[in-house]
């Protein structure tokens, strides 16, 4: 499976979506929001997103059934599945990925994993500014990377990593668009640091939408760049608390690969 943290080339052109009919059911469970969507070719058939503090396992299948019912489809009608693979909540990612793997395996359908940061960037893809998706990583840290929309193509400008907020915004010398829940949490701090260079997405751009996961995956499906179901796993970026406790100390963010 591709290591999306190391990609430096063109990853997605939102204006180059082929309208070939292909039904894709996509999920996002990387944060407190839980989103399910179905697209078909160039059309969004149905989408439902909820935000609450309950574990996603309590309502994910209900959302899937509701979205399928709204689109008048069944899971077996899908041509492929897509899911956010992180970074984000360890528990949330495991729930979403295990659900999609179960569906894809049982129905013998292909699957594509999509970066949650890439999905946030895609939701601001037409911005002329440097795009900086940020997700809250707790422990006073953030998950982040940088993208640019250039010549109608969304390009990744830096690798995904976990770091302090100060490191995440360091070196920015141009107008930048910040999106994601960490951009909301730390808006005042970012504005104080960057002044007029800091711009922020609208309310809807800070929540990962499953339709964004689906549109990005469509490009992969069209190129037959799907993931091995057995190898699909969360991209945590940093070690879990259990791993940290086993090794006795935490690896500093700057030293993480």
Image (cartoon, helix red, strand yellow):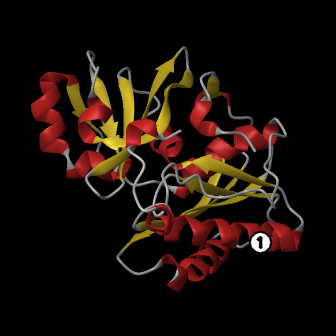
Say which quarter of the image contains residue 241.
Answer: bottom left
Left or right: residue 190 versus residue 40 is left
At x 61% / y 57%, what residue is drawn? 234
Residue found at the far right of this picture: 108
Say above or below: 137 vs 199: below
Say which quarter of the image contains residue 167.
Answer: top left
Q: Quadrant of the N terminus?
A: top right
At x 62% / y 73%, what residue is drawn? 70
The residue lying toward the viewer, choosing from 25 and 176, is 176
Q: How many marks?
A: 1
Say above or below: 244 vs 16: below
How far across and down, in percent of the image, does residue 41 sit? Answer: 73, 46
How far across and down, in percent of the image, does residue 91 sit? Answer: 51, 71
At x 80% / y 59%, what residue is drawn? 229
The residue lying toward the viewer, choosing from 117 and 66, is 117
At x 62% / y 38%, what residue is drawn? 4
Left or right: residue 189 versus residue 145 is left
Is residue 48 something one can see in this rendering?
no
Is residue 160 something one can see in this rendering?
yes
The residue lying toward the viewer, choosing from 48 and 115, is 115
Secondary structure beneath label 1? helix
Left or right: residue 143 versus residue 209 is left
Circle 1 sits on which residue?
A: 103
How far across and down, in percent of the image, does residue 176 sit? Answer: 30, 26
């Amino acid at each position: 499976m591709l290591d999306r943290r190391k990609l430096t080339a063109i990853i997605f052109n939102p204006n180059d979506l082929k309208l070939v009919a292909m039904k894709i059911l996509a999920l996002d469970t990387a944060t407190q929001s839980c989103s399910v969507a179905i697209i078909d070719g160039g059309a969004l058939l149905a989408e439902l997103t909820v935000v609450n503090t309950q574990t996603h396992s309590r309502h994910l299948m209900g959302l899937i059934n509701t979205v399928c019912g709204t689109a008048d489809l069944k899971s077996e009608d899908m041509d492929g599945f897509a899911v956010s693979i992180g970074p984000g909540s360890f528990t949330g990612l495991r729930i979403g990925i295990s659900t999609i793997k179960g569906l894809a395996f049982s129905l013998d359908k292909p699957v594509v994993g999509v970066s949650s940061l890439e999905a946030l960037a895609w939701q601001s893809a037409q911005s002329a500014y440097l795009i900086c998706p940020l997700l809250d990583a707790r422990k006073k840290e953030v998950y982040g990377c940088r993208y640019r929309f250039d010549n109608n193509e969304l390009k990744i400008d830096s690798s995904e990593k976990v770091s302090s907020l100060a490191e995440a915004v360091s070196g920015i010398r141009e107008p930048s668009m910040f999106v994601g829940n960490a951009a909301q949490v730390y808006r005042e701090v970012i504005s104080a640091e960057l002044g007029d260079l800091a711009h922020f997405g609208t309310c809807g751009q800070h929540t990962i939408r499953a339709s964004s996961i689906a549109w990005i995956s469509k490009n992969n499906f069209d190129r037959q760049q799907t993931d091995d179901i057995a190898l699909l796993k969360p991209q945590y970026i940093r070690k879990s608390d259990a791993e940290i406790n086993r090794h006795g100390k935490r690896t500093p963010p700057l030293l993480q690969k």
